[in-house]
Image (cartoon, rainbow, N blue to C red):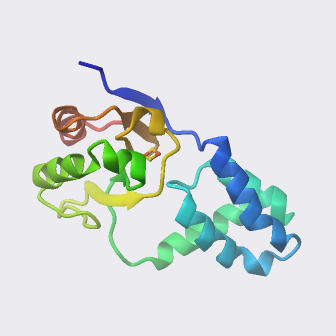
Amino acid sequence: MMKEAFTNYKTPSSQLVKVAEIAAPYRDRPEMLMKVVTQVQKIVPAFTDSVAAVIAREMNISQTQVYSFVTFYAMLSVKPRGKYIVRMCKSAPCHVLGAKEIVREMESLLGIKMGETTEDRRFTLEYCPCLGICDISPAIMINDKTYGNLTAESVRSVIKRYIREDVE
Ligand code: FES
């Protein structure tokens, strides 16, 4: 049996290229940050330092400006979210390789549906665009860590670990 792969998440360069394409038309137009951030969030699973750096570079604004906007924007979302955001890649390669089964397993283990947060606010389950690690699909990301080559069995042990202990 193949052991599940595990890494700290880094935005793949193919996605950074797309981020740059979204941000580039708004050079020197900081008032367009809202539009850029909303579009970028549709194509990247997580807002990493490198994503913020590319937006800052292309729009010719500071990285701090990008961060304060993203923080403010997150505060506007009233939905409570968990300590651990568990994201399931919903793109085709992961889907073909059994994402459905992984989702079913996570939902039954945590007693919530995709898009929901557990009552103790420990977990939120959500879908995200391709994580850029299709070679190890099906894959999930929990905060900034990715887990690939998952099976129902291995995802169960990953989630159980997060139930048992605080993973930093
Ligand atoms: S399709 Fe799932 S990581 Fe790319």
Which quadrant of the rendered structure holds the N terminus? top left
Q: How many labels does the image show?
A: 0
- Residue 3 in view of the camera: yes
- x, y percentage for residue 100? 23, 52
Q: Quadrant of the C terminus?
A: top left
Horizontal side, residue 66 vs residue 101: left or right: right
Q: Residue at x 37, y 53 (%)?
A: 87
Judge by depth and name the residue closer to the eye, 21 or 38: 21
Asked where in the image residue 150 lies, by quadrant, the reply is: top left
Q: Is residue 45 left or right of residue 109?
A: right
Q: Residue 54, image x and y in percent?
A: 75, 53
User: 49 above or below 24?
Assistant: above
User: Residue 61 is drawn in which quadrant?
Assistant: bottom right
Res 63 → quadrant: bottom right
Above-or-below relation of 58 to 100: below
- Vertical placement of residue 114 versus 8, above or below: below
- Residue under the point 87% across and 63% down: 60
Residue at image x 86%, y 70%?
Answer: 27
Quick check: can you spot residue 168? no
The image shows residue 143 at horizontal and vertical percentages of 42, 47
| Residue farthest along the top direction in this orientation | 1
Residue at image coords 40%, 29%: 6
Q: Position of residue 8 (x, y in %)?
A: 49, 34
